[in-house]
Amino acid sequence: MHIIVLVKQVPDIERVKFLSDSNRVDRKSVDSEINPFDLNAIEAAQQIKEQLGATVTAISMGPGTAEAVLREAIARDADRGILLCDDKFACSDTLATSYTLAAAIRKVGDFDLILCGEKTVDGDTGHIGPAVAERLGVSLLPFVSQITEVSADKVSAVTETSAGSLKVEATFPLLIMGTKELNTPRLPTLKEKLRARKAEVERWTSADLSDADASRFGAEGSGTWVESISVPPEKKRKGELLKGEDTARQLVAALDKEGLLKG
């Protein structure tokens, strides 16, 4: 069995700043980390590998620093790490990103299962999983909260829908988007981290994806763009100190003024 895991390096979204002149995230303004949802995908791959035996390939697209998230995946038992790193991939929207990832997966070759997080915390679109599945012509199981059974040719899982949980079964090849409820990712040991530090991470450029249409990479291949970015003002809590013997009356009057006692 061959499992491919898609991972991404994301900024600390709580502290990140924006480039006002270009409406883009300033990724240099804070430290970066692996997308939290991708850890669940890596853990799922690790569990299947332990159960059935599998080869796990982790793929990421980003700058040279994104090599760190692939080493994180290797520390968590991935066998191979591939970084798609080229200036031609820069400024990709989800359309161009999914095209580039699909091209890389085709170059990797035969696979049974692709695992990824349901979304990334920087873009929060949830587009990549469905788009990659569509480009590769494979089935998609979105918002998977539980993988109940895996065999050599099929998987049983629980997906979350607006109407509730749904038990499904699908055959390979297949792409699964995992939620945070999918599992609890284990921490790699010191030995595993040291092994990952010495591991080779392959770097592929646009030239390595020679069978793809280069005009569909990066900004040129992106059909969407950010018109503007605005950060809503943070609402601050306010308080009022009530004093005196008639505090109960004051409290009722204050609540009534705010319209909180109607009905």
Image (cartoon, rainbow, N blue to C red):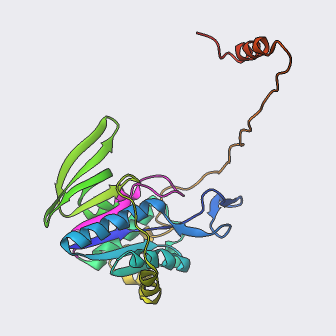
Counting from the top left corner in percent of width and height, residue 3 is at 27, 71
* Residue 63 seen in render: yes
Counting from the top left corner in percent of width and height, residue 88 is at 50, 75
Magenta stretch: residue 245 in it? no
Farthest-out residue, front: 245
Which residue shows up at 45% across the image and 70% down it?
217
Which residue shows up at 81% across the image and 27% down it?
240
The region drawn magenta spans 110-131
Query: Which one is in front, 87 or 81?
Result: 81
Query: Which one is in front, 8 or 253?
Result: 253
Q: Is residue 107 above or below residue 186?
A: below
Magenta stretch: residue 117 in it? yes
Residue 143 shown left or right of residue 248 in the figure: left
Give the quadrant of residue 48. bottom left
Q: Is residue 246 above or below residue 175?
A: above
Q: Is residue 117 above or below residue 253?
A: below
Counting from the top left corner in percent of width and height, residue 148 is at 22, 54
Give the quadrant of residue 132. bottom left
Counting from the top left corner in percent of width and height, residue 200 is at 42, 88
Query: Which one is in front, 38 or 23?
Result: 38
Residue 155 shown left or right of residue 160 in the figure: left
Which residue shows up at 50% across the image and 73% down it?
62
